[in-house]
Amino acid sequence: MSFVEYSDHIQEGDVAIIYLGHDSMMPVKVQQGAQTQTRYGAIRHSTDLIGKRYGSKVTCSKGGWVHVLHPTPELWTVTLPHRTQILYTTDIAMITMMLELRPGSVVCESGTGSGSLSHAILRTIAPTGHLHTVEFHQQRAETAAQEFRQHRVDHLVTVRNQDVCKDGFGVTGVADAVFLDIPSPWEAVKHAEAAMKTQGGRLCSFSPCIEQVQRTCEALAHQGFEEISTLEVLLRVHDVRTVSLPLPDFGSLPSESPERTAAVAVKTTTPPREIPGHTGYLTFATRART
């Protein structure tokens, strides 16, 4: 099992995703002789998981059942242990596209945090790319490095525990793209430029406050970055449901006709009454060729 390579069967040491319901999932490290408790009963790793195909329906000790799914960056984002606030798929999709990431890309990231974006980047740049990720907090950096080893993607990533605003990314002239998710990204812009290739590249900075965006844009312009733009991604999910609508009467039916009161069932969508609010601003820029 790897987060960037698919395997058919569950093996000892894998990190599997236990699907209990649409809004209830949990990651489990598969170990011989271990058990995992769920509201449907216990899952015995030796007999219920190891050797089974991913996607299998597993019956728990109380008679209820769950599905066991192969891990993906998307599933990890909604099940990972939170050490920090994380980025979700809505923003991640825009970031990976606007940074023009592809297999073989070299990316610098700060900070690593809980590793939500890191896993999506690794899946995108595999099998020949590399991620240089910097985390200021020592324990978070060590935990992230341990997770990358457990998920068998550590050959694609280098984790550094340092202050990117003071010490940079630890590499020079190698990055195709740089991502910043730190309190003062404007202080890291010069280090981002130093880490990027001389033939140019893309930069993205995530900030929750517009004042941070303003200072970052000023620093980007001062450093010679071009095509500076800021956007905000808001998700609006529509519910699909069946409703009953009366058939239109254009005055051609007799008043006593039963068709005047006939109805038809149709599928329609309804917008949410409440829309999830602001997550943050994404600022993109291009480093000019030198």
Image (tube, helix red, strand yellow):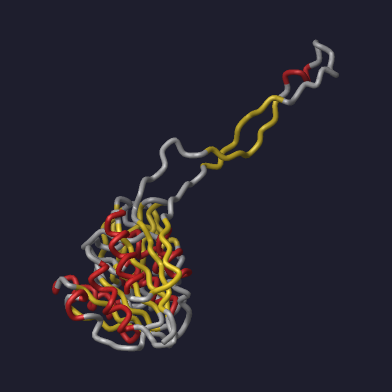
Residue 233 in the image: above or below residue 202: above
Nearer to us in this view, 124 or 105: 105
Quarter holding residue 150: bottom left
Image quarter hosting the N terminus: bottom left
209 left or right of 161 in image = right
In the image, taking residue 242 as reference, residue 194 lies left or right, namely left
Count of numbered circles on the image = 0
Q: Look at 25% across and 62% down and name the residue there.
A: 81
Viewport quadrant of the C terminus: bottom left
Q: Residue at x 35, y 49 (%)?
A: 278
* Residue 156 x %, y %: 35, 84
Q: Residue at x 44, y 35 (%)?
A: 273
Whether residue 231 can be seen here: yes
**Viewer-proximal residue, 127 or 100?**
100
Asked if one can make out residue 1 in the rendered structure from this viewpoint, the answer is no
Q: Residue at x 24, y 76 (%)?
A: 134
Rendered location of residue 258, percent (x, y): 78, 17
Determine whether 168 is above or below 137 in the image: below
